[in-house]
Amino acid sequence: MVIDPICKMEVDPATAKWTSKHDGKKYYFCAPGCKAMFDQDPVKWAGKGTETHTGHGHGHGCCGGH
C-alpha cells in the first residue's frame, strides 16, 4: 500500500485508477479530485505521501476524507 499525498488515504498501487508522475516518481490517488489537486501544483504535494493514515476523515473536498 502507498499513501495518497493529498488526503493521506492508503491506496493499493496494483488497483489504483488515478496516478500521476512527477520528477520521475509515480504517485497514486484514491479519487480523481486528489489527482487533480496534485496535478495543479505537484511541487507542493510531492514528497508528502510518506505520513501514515490515521484512519480519521480529513475533510478534504476531493474525496470526503474517507
Image (cartoon, rainbow, N blue to C red):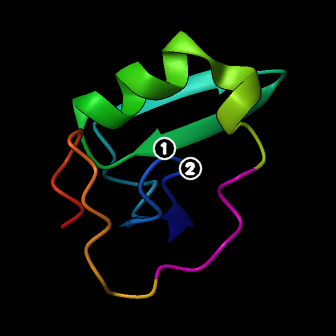
Q: Is residue 41 left or right of residue 22?
A: left
Say whether residue 31 is magenta: no
Task: Quadrant for the C terminus, please.
Answer: bottom left
User: Between 9 and 11, which is closer to the camera in this rendering?
Assistant: 9
Magenta part of the chain? 48-53
Label 2: which secondary element:
loop
Q: Position of residue 33 (x, y in %)?
A: 26, 30
Q: Which residue is mark 1?
A: 28
Q: Quadrant of residue 46?
A: top right
User: Between 51 and 10, which is closer to the camera in this rendering?
Assistant: 51
Q: Is residue 42 left or right of residue 25?
A: left
Q: Which residue is mark 2?
A: 5
Q: Amino acid at mark 2?
A: Pro
Q: Is residue 48 above or below residue 8?
A: above
Label 1: which secondary element:
strand
Residue at horizontal 30 percent and vertical 84 percent from the top: 56
Residue at horizontal 82 percent and vertical 24 percent from the top: 24
Q: Position of residue 21 (x, y in %)?
A: 64, 22
The residue most toward the right is 23
Magenta stretch, main secondary structure class = loop
Q: Which mark is residue 38?
A: none
Tell me how many marks there are.
2
Q: Quadrant of residue 23?
A: top right
- Give neighbour class at mark 1: few <14, some 14-19, many 20+ (Cα, 10 Å): many
Say whether residue 50 is magenta: yes
